[in-house]
Image: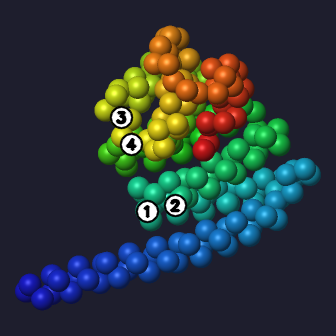
Amino acid sequence: MKKIKYLSMLCMFVELLIACSNQEKRIKDLWKVEDTVNYQNFTDDENKKIEKLLNAFSLEEKIDKLNWNSGYSQQCYVLRKLYFEKIIPREVFLDSCASVYKRYEANQTNISFHTLGYAVCLYYLGERKQANELFIKILDKSAEKYFAPKRDYEIIVTVCSKLLGIDNGNNLKIDEFFFNMTDDDIINILCGN
């Protein structure tokens, strides 16, 4: 009976390894499809390609729910491209990215850099209460250990403080740009990354 249990567990582990190695190939193949999209001459056919691509990347996230590069980041990349090429409006971009982040965050036990992207999307979608709760979690000193390098965390603290409307008196050594970021800068840098 124990042998059957161990054999079953071994088979599941091997299946997982095969799925992960196949996933890398599938994602590469999906990028080849994305390369064929003509963003400058965006037609219904191009839109259908994008829909299929986003659906395929969404299926990939289910294979490794803890890995940002397992379909989540790829969806956000495509959404960023659609937004920067002015194919989708800001609200659609933010809402779509927030949906990706929400699925990713649902499987995480610790906060991460992506928590900030999620919070920023929610903030600019008008979901201030939920966004502020995430900003406060990020600003908690115990959260700093989840962010590396330290400079990244200092930038994150600056953005959170700015959006919460609190003075950041931590004397952080951050470029002046980060203190003076506009809403567009914050969205362009942090949403979908």
Q: Which residue is mark 1?
A: 64
The mark nearer the N terminus, 4 or 2, is 2
Q: Residue 70, which numbered label? A: 2
Around disc 2, counting alpha carbons within 10 Å, would you say few (fewer than 14), some (14 to 19), or many (20 or more)? many
Question: Measuring 36% from the left and 40% from the top, which residue is drawn there?
Answer: 145
Q: CA distance from mark 3 to mark 2?
A: 24 Å
Task: Count every numbered label the image shows and give the total.
Answer: 4
Quarter of the view holding residue 58: bottom right
Instruction: Evaluate if marks 4 and 1 touch, with contact meaning CB atoms under 8 Å apart.
Output: no
Quarter of the view holding residue 155: top right
Q: Does 78 sit above or below residue 33?
A: above
Residue 163 at x, y percent in the picture: 55, 18
The one of 66 and 171 positioned closer to us in this rendering: 171
Q: CA distance from mark 4 to mark 1?
A: 20 Å
Q: Which residue is mark 3?
A: 143
Q: Nearer the viewer, mark 3 or mark 2?
A: 3
The mark nearer the N terminus, 3 or 1, is 1
Instruction: Evaluate if marks 3 and 1 touch, with contact meaning CB atoms under 8 Å apart.
Output: no
Q: Nearer the viewer, mark 4 or mark 2?
A: 4
Q: Does 134 sit above or below residue 27?
A: above
Where is the N terminus found, in terms of image quarters? bottom left
Amino acid at the residue labelled 2: Ser
Amino acid at the residue labelled 1: Asp
Query: Which structural element holds mark 3?
Result: helix
Amino acid at the residue labelled 3: Ala
Where is the C terminus found, in terms of image quarters? top right
Amino acid at the residue labelled 4: Tyr
The mark nearer the N terminus, 3 or 2, is 2
Q: Which residue is mark 4?
A: 146
Q: CA distance from mark 2 to mark 1?
A: 6 Å
